[in-house]
Amino acid sequence: MAYGKKEEPIFFNDKQMRQFVADGYVIFKPDVPGEVHKVVHEKLKFMEEEEFNCGNNVLPRVPEMDRVLNSPEVRGALISVLGPGYIEHPDRHSHFIPPGREPVPVAQKCHQDGYTPLARQRQHYPRFARIMYYPQDSPVEIGPTHLIPGSYGHKLLPEEDRQKAVPIAGEAGTVSISHFDIGHGAGINKINKPRAMIKFIYARAEEPSEPSWDCQDRAWRNPEQFETPHNLNLMWSHIWDWLCGKKDRYESFRASNADSMKGALDALNANDLDTRISAMHSVATSVDLSAIPTLIERLNCDLQWERLTAIYTLGALGQPAVDPLVTALKDSANGEAGDPTNEIWNENSILMNDASFALAAIGEPSLDPLIRLLEDSSEWVRINAAFALGEMDSTAAKAVPALTRCLDDASHCVVRTATEALGTIKQHSEEFLPSLGRLLKMGRPEWQTIIRRDWSPYDQVRVNAALAFARLGKDASSAEEILIDKLADPNGYVAAFVLDALRRIGTPLAMESAMAYLMSRRWDESIRIGRLY
């Protein structure tokens, strides 16, 4: 296995990136020798049948998978979607389905993953991506994972959408890259062979400043064919423009010269969903401000395609929608607990209020109102404001002092969200690095209680802080000593992100400490039962 200079990455073209934006995934096959896949499959089968599922340790247990992950095609896909300098997330998992397991319909198994045992906010922009790799031939009959096209913006997975899941089938070596929040579920293994799939997670480190794929046309155009059941041209073009690094994330939509629907305001109440979506696109084109109250009513509704279009229509309307959205966000603090479309905080999946997405989509006109909301008496409002500011990237640089003060909030939920936002904004890091470092070393006593899967809120606070340090890279060099100390953190996710932060800082001391950590954990692949040396 080669660990030296890597081959040049093979980037996605515009067609592949448009498919990723519209459907949320792309399937491809790296040029890796078939023998590699055979060895991987055999080792995974032995691990499952004779040992145990190694979970996040599956890559050092089966290091041959490096050949796949470091292939030009996989690296090119990751750079295309997440930008250069993407971060390897420590969450990895082998999904092994033996034959004969009691069949459960795919639709029933569809779900959206969590990033860690405790949750983080779902995002529409592709800040996280999932690689799924099949080491054996995976026809539909062996039960490959199914994905629900376009569902990465969903708050929940309605039955109608679950029925539209499509299989990620292919021969040995097939790989898919998907938006992390896309709905998915395992298929049914109907043949007498075990099925293995290994997932790996990666995170974006940098705000997009230009296309990171082989881009020949910076204007959004709908794919000629897409599997998402409705045309979400407005949302797709907004995300495309973000990926292209455009300051105006509605540039492509405004340049498309979309026809305005006659009677669009009345059509917002049509019985047909596609008609209502087209009407919202027309409202965005004509900038019909009288539609704002109706659009706000559509936020957080059960019809996922409609709420998504409403978010980005309000974003396109801009400044006049800010005050009504702020009011809607403050009103959401009074929502009924247990309502899955308006949950205050759920450690399975944190679902931000749609008003915060819309305020972020508006951009700079939302900045001052969101900064003021960081001091609201409602914890839920402060969380949503911090989230929206983080989604604005460097546009929200002005919010750094207020977000830094949020790191002293009594609520771990606010602290976790503000930490994530600061790591995304990345500006004026000298102001918040001391507070971020303190979070790695000390948390409030009330954050120490175990609440889910053997994790406490303080575990997640430290994980978010460590990921922020990794995103900052060289800008985190003043925290070098704290990071070196936290290599011994009892939470493996913290240690992994801290290790990556030190690698990115790159000073002699940082690299020496990182190497010492890795050397003490070196895995000897030749050791097995009966051979100890």
Image (tube, helix red, strand yellow):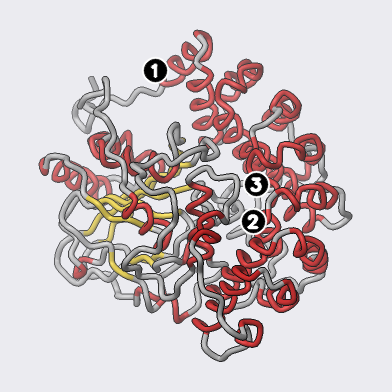
Q: Position of residue 71 (x, y in %)?
A: 25, 36
Work out how far the residue at label 1 is from the one at label 2, CA to CA, in angstroms.
Answer: 45 Å
What amino acid is labelled 1 in the image? Met
Label 1, residues with CA under 10 Å away: few <14, some 14-19, many ≥20: few
Q: Is residue 252 above or below residue 215?
A: below
What amino acid is labelled 3 in the image? Met
Work out how far the residue at label 1 is from the one at label 3, CA to CA, in angstroms.
Answer: 40 Å
Mark 3, residue position = 392
Q: Quadrant of residue 212?
A: top left
Query: In front of the other: label 1 or label 3?
Result: 3
Mark 2, residue position = 361
What amino acid is labelled 2 in the image? Ala
Mark with earlier residue (3, 2): 2
Label 3, residues with CA under 10 Å away: few <14, some 14-19, many ≥20: many
Q: Is residue 476 above or below residue 212?
A: above
Quarter of the N terminus within the rendering:
top left
* Viewer-side residue, 291 vs 461: 291
> How many marks are shown on the rendered structure?
3
Q: What residue appears at the point 55 percent right and 51 percent down from the top-left corner?
A: 117
Label 1–label 2 contact, CB within 8 A: no
Q: What residue appears at the point 30 percent right and 74 percent down from the top-left corner?
A: 102
